Amino acid sequence: MAAAGDARVLLPGSTVGILGGGQLGRMMALAGSAMGYRFVALDPADDSPCGQVADQIVAAYDDQEAARELARRADVITYEFENVDAGVAAMLMEESYVPQGSELLYTTQHRLREKRAIEAAGARVAPYAEIRSVDDLREAAASFGLPCVLKTATGGYDGKGQWVIRSEAEIPEAFETLSRAGTELVLEQFIRFTKELSVIAARSPQGETKAFPVAENIHVDNILHLSIVPARIDAAVQAEAERLAVRIAEGLGAVGLIAVELFLTEDGELFVNELAPRPHNSGHYTMEACRTSQFEQHVRAVCGLPLGDTALLTPVVMVNVLGEHVAPLLARMGRQDEAERRLGTSAKVHLYGKSEAKSRRKMGHVNVLASGCDAALSWIRETGIWEMPDGV
Ligand SMILES: Nc1ncnc2c1ncn2[C@@H]1O[C@H](COP(=O)(O)OP(=O)(O)O)[C@@H](O)[C@H]1O
Ligand SMILES: [Mg+2]
């Protein structure tokens, strides 16, 4: 981990190397390029979303020679996903400047390590147990009660690697299916949350911290659908969530961004669900709605600049654009938008430059700026592009 004494200030003109060339790297490069930084990404896919707006080394993530070239070309290295190969991370630490270090990656790559670190930082997580056998699972499920959630400790995303166990009869199949991933398993008590929230905090190598406003997140089929900001919750809960995120960033010695996903229960309790040591989909709203975007903040943090002001400029709803939404969205963009004029909303479209609009694939997002979240939600509903879940 980078100690405070190791903090360097890299001014614009420096080159930032990014492990990964997806949309998070692309938006990082766009924000940083505006400030005068240069970017080079390492990604196996030619013409990656980030490679379209920055230099790219086309090679596998665990290609040591390619990583060494990235180290040679960059003054500072960051990453846009958490499953960075441990060998590559260690080599880059040797040969280059990686202010984020590898410890936070190591912690957040594994749900059990992550939960222990969150608890050590003084935040609550859902009751959980490490599961090594079907008997462990039976015992833990009996003590937590049903339903409960079995998860693989590593590699899960968008609800993959999870099984909500609703009856005892499912236990053997749930264990057997998730065991095939070949990683440890963890069982969590099911939290009957009223809302899912997230807070993105930033910490610089000098130890400065700042949190962005809380987002209220709505998922459809385990994929983020909407982020609503300001979240429709008490001011006291907002303040507590932001305080927790800063405490976790400090407790884990994070550098750069750390996204904290939370469950809010009926009686106002907050449980941390999981962390991501990088920009987060639920922070895309910051691009137009905050004084500083999460991407600019990340670049500032890893380059050792003072962090930017995170104040919210306007209510906003972010809606994700999946493969199936691209064609109707593009058709709409070519016309005058009568609903936008009537509702007083501004839809800021971000597309990631992915060529194949596969169903369920994240292709972009729209930040709908409005005088209030209701108007933004009305615009989204009126377009007819998205299926809106009940109760939004
Ligand atoms: N313990 C739990 N109680 C209730 N719902 C849960 C629990 N764990 C996960 N979920 C639901 O499943 C979703 C995905 O789980 P998460 O752990 O965030 O995995 P992923 O890596 O797929 O985002 C959460 O956003 C939440 O809606
Ligand atoms: Mg999640």
Image: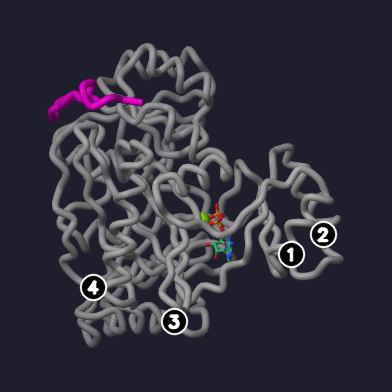
Quarter of the view holding residue 28: top left
Q: Amino acid at mark 4?
A: Pro
Q: Earlier in the sequence, mark 2 or mark 1?
A: 1
**Picture coordinates of residue 186, whole percent (x, y):** 66, 49
Q: Amino acid at mark 2?
A: Ile
Under mark 1, the amino acid is Ile
The residue that appears at 49% across and 36% down in the rendered structure is 107
Q: Residue at x 14, y 34 (%)?
A: 36
Marks 2 and 3, the one that precedes in the sequence? 2
Q: Is residue 120 magenta?
A: no
Against 13, residue 268 (above or below) is: below
Q: Is residue 12 magenta?
A: yes
Residue topped by disc 1 = 165
Local crowd size for mark 2, using a 10 Å CA cut-off: few (<14), some (14–19), many (≥20): some
Residue drawn 15% across the image and 26% down it: 9
Q: Which residue is mark 2?
A: 171
Q: Which residue is mark 4?
A: 315
Q: CA distance from mark 3 to mark 4?
A: 16 Å
**Type of residue at label 3?**
Val
Q: Where are the magenta residues, as a range?
A: 1-15
- In the rendered image, which residue does mark 3 sit on? 392
Asked which secondary structure carries label 2, the reply is helix
